[in-house]
Amino acid sequence: MLTMDDIVRDGHPSLRTVAEPVQMPASDESHEILQEMLQYVINSQNPEIAKKYGLRPGIGLAAPQINVSKRMIAVHVHDDRDKLYSYGIFNPKIVSHSVERSYLKSGEGCLSVDEPFPGYVPRYARVTVTGTTLEGKEIRLRLKGLPAIVFQHEIDHLNGIMFYDHINKQNPFAEIENATVIE
Ligand SMILES: O=C(O)C[C@@H](Cc1ccccc1)[C@H](O)SCc1ccccc1
Ligand code: NI
């Protein structure tokens, strides 16, 4: 199983590299890695398992974070109506997005960043994401709220972008125009 020892930290070249598309159908190796990534995210949200193995809780994980430069992400997150979005996705792509933005009032963190980077991280309020699931199904997801935020955070990792790249350097808590706050 994956643990924090498998997650590379800020400064590792993998986090600043554009990841390669996964040739479909995915190889057994890629399938196994993506399954392990999703299992990490699920395990990290189980208090007993997280404590036993020292896992930092997460709602998403991208392959470059375990030094695999492939376009694969895992997400396990509930929206504000408690609907669960639990996916391992090959080649996720944002195919459309709102003009309106949103951001987490608490800011963002990252399993690959050990210190806090305070500040608002502007994201698109709504995104449409396509990709291929672990089960080999082509999906098209229309997302808003926290699911939209986590998918954008993880897809950023595939493009070598870190959440703090989006924070206003002059004033990290500057109001973001045309944006809704997610509490
Ligand atoms: O490092 C990662 O990619 C996993 C992040 C993803 C993430 C961070 C901030 C906002 C959305 C997604 C971890 O999930 S950070 C821990 C966390 C846990 C619950 C809610 C938000 C962040
Ligand atoms: Ni991250």
Image (tube, rainbow, N blue to C red):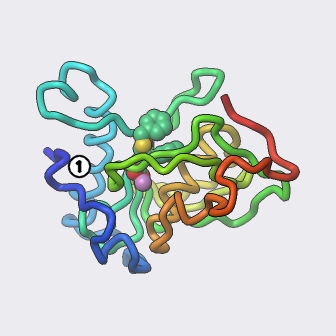
Side of 174 where 120 appears, left or right: left
In percent of width and height, residue 28 lies at: 21, 64
- In the rendered image, the residue lying farthest to the front is 170
**Quadrant in which the N terminus appears:** top left
Q: How many marks?
A: 1
Q: Tell me if 170 is positioned left or right of 92 in this view.
A: right
x and y, in percent, of residue 153 in the image: 53, 55
Q: Mark yes or no: residue 4 visible.
A: yes
Q: Residue at x 65, y 52 (%)?
A: 172
> At which x and y percent is residue 57?
33, 34
Name the quarter showing ligand 2: bottom left
The response on whether ligand 1 sits within 8 Å of label 1 is no
Q: Would you name the residue on which mark 1 appears?
A: 36
Task: Please give left or right for residue 13 compared with residue 28 in the image.
Answer: right
Q: Residue at x 37, y 78 (%)?
A: 23
Q: Position of residue 123 (x, y in %)?
A: 68, 54
Q: Nearer the viewer, residue 53 or 11?
A: 11
Q: Secondary structure at mark 1?
A: helix
> In the rendered structure, which amino acid carries the disc numbered 1?
Glu
**Closer-to-camera residue (55/84):** 55
Q: Quadrant of the C terminus?
A: top right
Does 76 appear above or below 118?
A: above
Query: Label 1: how many residues lie within 10 Å, few (<14), some (14-19) or many (20+)?
Result: some
Name the residue rendered at 62%, 58% in the picture: 167
Up-down: is 55 above or below 159? above
Residue placed at 36% from the left, 70% from the top? 15
Q: In terms of depth relative to the viewer, which is nearer, 23 or 73?
A: 73
* View extreme (right): residue: 178
Residue 59 visible in the snapshot: no
Q: Nearer the viewer, residue 31 or 62?
A: 62
